[in-house]
Image: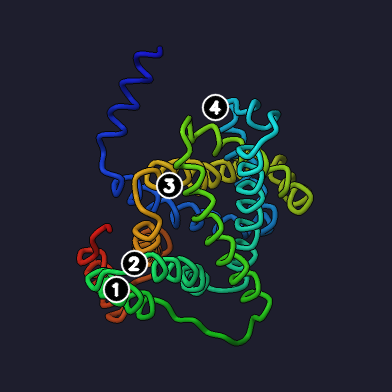
Amino acid sequence: MATTGSTLRRRAERLPPTAYFVTSAVFHYFGPSLAVLLFVHVSALGVAWLRIVAAAAVLAAWRRPWRLLRTPGPERTLVAALGAVLAVMNICFYLAVDRLPLSTVGAIEFVGPILLAVIGLRAPRNLAALGLTVGGVAVLTDVRLAGAPLGFFFAFANCAGFVLYVLLGHRAARIDGNRFDRLAAAMVVAAVVASPFGVVDGLRAFAHPWWLLWGVGVGICSSVIPYLSDQLAMARLPRATYALLLALLPATALVMGLILLGQVPTVADLAGVALVITGVAVHRPE
């Protein structure tokens, strides 16, 4: 068993970190697309709770991270902070997309990571790449700052949470030891933090097996797969490089919207995708 695990680990390390980022990018909007469709049956808070608890159950059963939660020290503090951020970020994200279009929430979500890229990138080539990706994000998104002030409050709160997730996630990924145990422990903390807000609405799904299975699928697609992929990517990508690559996510949202929600891209959407891809191609890690 140990030999098999070591073999899988070596194979995983041979893959380029961008492969893990692309996996995360695909599922970053595939999962929320499933969640939006579930809003018809379960409230946004309930779906957020189902997502977090399902992901926590899967990761905890796999990693059994109880030692990290019991042992005092800086690592437990980091895990607790990351878990709290994951809970608040996911709750705010679903409350925002319940009131605003997914593309609008996505546009706001990338304000913070783009600022991180500005801080971390200094070479002229990378600054040019940043300009291209920012332009692409601007073309791709249609941010309407009227009509839903509470939705925008939650969207900007999610943006702040996303920045903290990138910072804390990078720190957790770079510590020696098994980063997956830290992620699993953080998801358990997130489930505890989120429960007072969504457990009542989320429990409604337990009376409908199909809704419950749907919620579990949202958790796996939205949290388990992308967060594991993020840890593998963050461990080997500089923070600024990772922040810049996040600009690919609006393009991913466009593709997911076309495939899952039937949202046909306009000429402007395609132009935005082209700018983002060009920016990523121009960028070089420092």
Q: Which residue is mark 4?
A: 63
Q: Is residue 85 left or right of residue 120?
A: right
Residue 4: % across, % down:
35, 16
**From mark 1 to mark 3, how far is it between C-alphas?**
24 Å
Q: Which residue is mark 1?
A: 127
Q: Earlier in the sequence, mark 4 or mark 1?
A: 4
**From mark 4 to mark 3, how far is it between C-alphas?**
17 Å
Q: Is residue 50 left or right of residue 29?
A: right
Find residue 230 and name its label. 3
Q: Earlier in the sequence, mark 4 or mark 3?
A: 4
Q: Amino acid at mark 4?
A: Arg
Q: Which residue is mark 2?
A: 121
Q: Amino acid at mark 2?
A: Leu
Q: Earlier in the sequence, mark 1 or mark 3?
A: 1
- Helix or strand or loop: what does disc 4 sit on? helix
Q: Earlier in the sequence, mark 3 or mark 2?
A: 2
- Residue at position x 45%, y 71% from top? 115
Residue 92: % across, % down:
64, 63
Number of the front mark, 4 or 1 = 1
Crowding near the residue tagged with mark 4, few <14, some 14–19, many ≥20 C-alpha atoms within 10 Å? some
Crowding near the residue tagged with mark 1, few <14, some 14–19, many ≥20 C-alpha atoms within 10 Å? some
Q: Which quadrant would the C terminus be assigned to in this image?
A: bottom left
**From mark 3 to mark 2, how far is it between C-alphas?**
20 Å
Q: Are marks 1 and 2 in contact (CB under 8 Å)?
A: yes
- Residue at position x 49%, y 55% from top? 166
